């Protein structure tokens, strides 16, 4: 067995953890941006709607356009997007605190977003080559890095701002720089992950399932799956953005307290990502998605009636059950588009998340016209909408990739 084939057939935890750390360093920027919006809003004298446009710029550039990066990734391996994406994600975000003009903040946000967008499809595709026969588990290891990044971002950014001031936010680029240093020592293995050497000595691109036809009905089912993921993403970003607005602007509370609440919610999601994937493998991906949204809809109202420690427990539980379906839905999308893994990953990790994030702008309009508490409470409807959509997804379809027993 040649070296490249061995890489593809073996579960390589070391490489998966390295890629997961890069995922964490990249998504720290996305996770921190909603938490610092109240600070940027005050500094630049913005309305809730114009502050929401910063999130819109971030989500369009970091997420909505990811399928385009996935399309080019499917055409030819582009491993250089992994270090480049992580670096620009950190650089753009770390500099966003310096300008005094709204336009420059938007441009730096977009630079960071493009870095995020370029990292994810290539990252998920590369990670798949190191999962062996444990695809869901391997992708969960990679995904949890992003979950941790989202979780750590708010508390790290608000800690820096609270103790040292907004001008010290550029120190957050250090996470990207550490990843680049670590990546240097494993670059040969990662750069060659997408190719395998045939008996004739030629190098060809590896695509799991490339010899199979796209299952009939895939595109309709994928559209519904993306719709359910959009509702899940809108719920996630809505809580990330409006928990800080509620406790900092409305309640005039401690920014670190608000950041800790957001981090608790996202740490719950990280735990759910690792714990939910084995259950989804056992119970079925669609069934697990439906269960996740049922539990989220049941737990969500408790956010408004709990306080103190119980509020942290509630937010952790909501994050756990809501975000735990993230990796199973990626596997579903890749199964529905077996010949286009990059596009499938871009749609679920990028487009669905970004489109859900665009909903933060809608919540900003609600907050401006009614109030921040009304905007926060309106999020309750979103997991219910996702549940309704998920009931109509046809999955599995005729063809499914072989899995280990």
Image: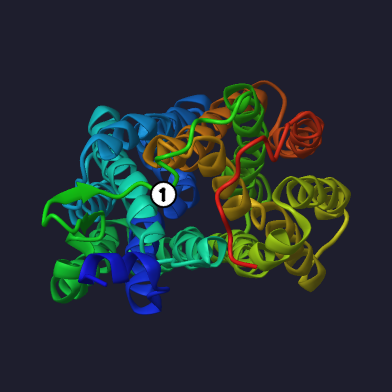
Looking at the image, which is closer to me, 255 or 33? Answer: 33
Whole-percent x and y of residue 232? 66, 41
Whole-percent x and y of residue 126? 32, 56
The reply to whether residue 249 is in sight is no
Apparent side of residue 264 relative to residue 6 in the rendered image (left or right): right
Q: In this view, does 26 lie above or below 214?
A: below
| Image quadrant where residue 209 sits | top left
Q: Residue beneath label 1, please?
A: 208
Query: In what quadrant of the picture does the N terminus appear?
Result: bottom left
Residue that appears at 26% across and 45% down: 115
Apparent side of residue 123 relative to residue 231 in the rendered image (left or right): left
The reply to whether residue 389 is in sight is yes
Residue that appears at 88% across and 55% down: 305
Q: How many labels does the image show?
A: 1
Outermost residue, front side: 200
Name the image colouring: rainbow
Whole-percent x and y of residue 25? 34, 63
Q: Quick one: SS at disc 1?
A: loop
Looking at the image, which is closer to me, 152 or 352? Answer: 352
Query: In what quadrant of the picture does the C terminus appear?
Result: bottom right
Q: In this view, does 338 lie above or below 180?
A: above
Q: Residues within 10 Å of mark 1 (few under 14, many from 20)?
A: some
Q: In this view, does 189 lie above or below 216?
A: below
Q: Is residue 148 above or below residue 360?
A: below
Residue that appears at 71% across and 38% down: 395
Looking at the image, which is closer to me, 188 or 321? Answer: 188
Whole-percent x and y of residue 136? 56, 61
Looking at the image, which is closer to me, 97 or 76? Answer: 76
Apparent side of residue 354 relative to residue 393 in the rendered image (left or right): left
């Amino acid at each position: 067995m040649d070296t490249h084939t061995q890489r593809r057939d073996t579960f390589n935890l070391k490489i998966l953890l390295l890629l997961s750390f890069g995922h964490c360093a990249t998504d720290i920027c996305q996770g921190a941006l909603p938490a610092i919006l109240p600070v940027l809003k005050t500094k630049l004298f913005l309305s809730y709607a114009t502050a929401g446009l910063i999130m819109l710029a971030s989500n369009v550039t970091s997420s909505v356009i990811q399928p385009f990066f996935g399309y080019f990734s499917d055409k030819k391996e582009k491993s250089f997007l992994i270090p480049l994406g992580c670096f620009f994600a950190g650089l753009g975000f770390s500099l966003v605190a310096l300008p005094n003009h709204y336009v420059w903040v938007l441009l730096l946000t977009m630079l960071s977003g493009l870095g995020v967008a370029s990292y994810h499809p290539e990252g998920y595709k590369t990670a798949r080559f190191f999962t062996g026969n444990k695809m869901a588990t391997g992708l969960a290891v990679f995904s949890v890095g992003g979950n941790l990044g989202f979780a750590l971002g708010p508390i790290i950014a608000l800690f820096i701002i609270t103790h040292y001031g907004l001008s010290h936010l550029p120190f957050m680029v250090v996470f990207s720089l550490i990843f680049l240093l670590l990546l240097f020592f494993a670059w040969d293995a990662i750069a060659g992950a997408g190719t395998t050497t045939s008996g004739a000595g030629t190098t060809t691109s590896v695509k799991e399932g490339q010899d199979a036809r796209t299952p009939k009905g895939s595109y309709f089912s994928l559209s519904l799956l993306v719709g359910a993921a959009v509702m899940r993403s809108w719920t996630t970003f809505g809580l990330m953005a409006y928990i800080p607005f509620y406790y900092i602007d409305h309640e005039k509370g401690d920014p670190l307290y608000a950041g800790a609440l957001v981090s608790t919610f996202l740490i719950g999601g990280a735990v759910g990502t690792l714990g939910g994937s084995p259950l989804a493998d056992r119970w079925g991906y669609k069934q697990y998605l439906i269960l996740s949204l049922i539990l989220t809809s049941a737990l969500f109202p408790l956010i408004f009636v709990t306080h103190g420690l119980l509020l942290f427990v509630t937010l952790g539980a909501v994050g756990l059950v809501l975000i735990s379906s993230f990796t199973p839905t990626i596997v579903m999308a890749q199964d529905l588009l077996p010949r286009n893994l990059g596009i499938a990953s871009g749609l679920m990790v990028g487009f669905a998340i970004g489109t859900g994030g665009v909903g933060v702008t809608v919540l900003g309009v609600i907050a401006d016209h009614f109030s921040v508490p009304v905007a926060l409470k309106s999020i309750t409807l979103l997991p219910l909408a996702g549940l309704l959509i998920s009931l109509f997804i046809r999955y599995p379809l005729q063809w499914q990739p072989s899995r280990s027993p």
